[in-house]
Image (cartoon, rainbow, N blue to C red):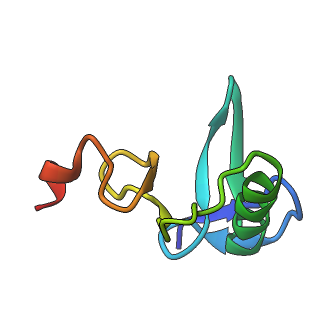
Amino acid sequence: MNTRYCSICSTSFDIDEEGIEGDIGIIPVAFCSVCKTGIREFAEQNWDLAPTGEHRTLTVCPVCDEVICDEDCSNASARA
């Protein structure tokens, strides 16, 4: 088990099965799945990241971890 502690709620979680970790600037952070979802919803509500009227879907690219709309990722060919 690869245990991490959430930077928001301090819950322990297995990074291999849920949650994310990375850096905000130079500060290392880890977020459990609940807090990760909360951060995403907060950003969508406050920075107009919600899907447009064209029914586009925001997702995270599994190749480069960029937030993308549908198949707009510049690394889409790497997923094929």
Relative depth, front residue between 44 and 25 = 44
Q: Is residue 31 above or below residue 12?
A: above
Q: Name which residue lies at 65% across and 60% down.
A: 50
Judge by depth and name the residue closer to the eye, 78 or 47.
Answer: 47
* Among the 4 quarters of the image, the one containing residue 10: bottom right
Image coordinates of residue 34 in percent, x first then y, are 75, 74
Horizontal side of 18 relative to 42 (left or right) equals: left
Above/below status of 65 relative to 9: above
- Residue 55: horizontal and vertical position, in percent? 49, 71
What x and y, as percent, mark residue 5? 75, 61
Query: In this view of the protein, which residue sits in the foreground, 50 or 6?
Result: 50
Residue 69's image quarter? bottom left
What residue appears at the point 61 percent right and 66 percent down from the top-left corner?
19
Quadrant housing the C terminus: bottom left
Looking at the image, which is closer to me, 16 or 53? 53
Q: How many marks?
A: 0
Q: Residue at x 70, y 63 (%)?
A: 36
Residue 21, given in percent of the width and then of the height, sits at 60, 51
In the rendered image, the residue lying farthest to the top is 26
Is 36 on the left-hand or right-hand side of 78? right
Residue most toward the front? 53
**Residue shown at 37%/62% (left/top)?**
70
Q: Quadrant of residue 28?
A: top right
